[in-house]
């Protein structure tokens, strides 16, 4: 919550965006053991977004703008 929680405008990218933002601001490291698993099921929001081209493009545009405007993300 300290980093803003899930942004509903980012749709199926909200969780990934927040995870990256936390890693960039709080730090991260490589650990040779599985700490989390990311699964995409057939009926997931991610899968439904990916196959709806117009919706996927719209959300990707939103994510791109959000990353560009968030100082936690490097300009490069």
Image (cartoon, rainbow, N blue to C red):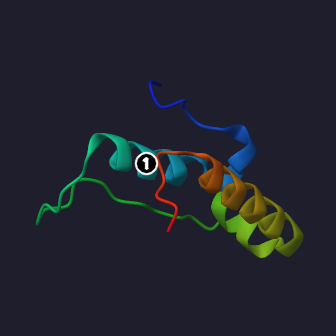
Q: Could you say where residue 49 lies in the image, as x and y percent from the top left?
A: 74, 64
Q: Secondary structure at mark 1?
A: helix
Q: Foreground residue, 18 or 26?
A: 26
63 lies left or right of 5: right
Which residue corresponds to the image point at 20% horizontal and 61% vertical from the top-left? 34
Q: Quadrant of residue 51?
A: bottom right
Residue 3 position in % (x across, y down): 47, 31
Q: Quadrant of residue 31?
A: bottom left
Residue at label 1?
19
Q: Residue furthest right?
A: 54
Residue in front for this viewpoint, 34 or 63? 63
When the figure is inspected, residue 24 is found, relative to residue 2, above or below; the finding is below
**Residue drawn at point x = 56 percent, y = 64 percent:** 41
Determine the residue positioned at 41% across, 60% down.
38
Name, please, the residue furthest toward the front. 75
Q: In the drawing, does residue 5 fall left or right of residue 27?
A: right
């Amino acid at each position: 919550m300290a980093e803003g929680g899930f942004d509903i405008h980012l749709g199926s990218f909200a969780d990934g965006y927040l995870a990256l933002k936390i890693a960039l601001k709080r730090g991260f490291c490589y650990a040779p053991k599985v700490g989390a698993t990311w699964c995409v099921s057939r009926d997931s929001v991610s899968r439904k977004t990916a196959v709806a081209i117009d919706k996927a493009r719209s959300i990707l545009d939103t994510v791109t703008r959000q990353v560009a405007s968030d100082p936690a993300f490097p300009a490069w």
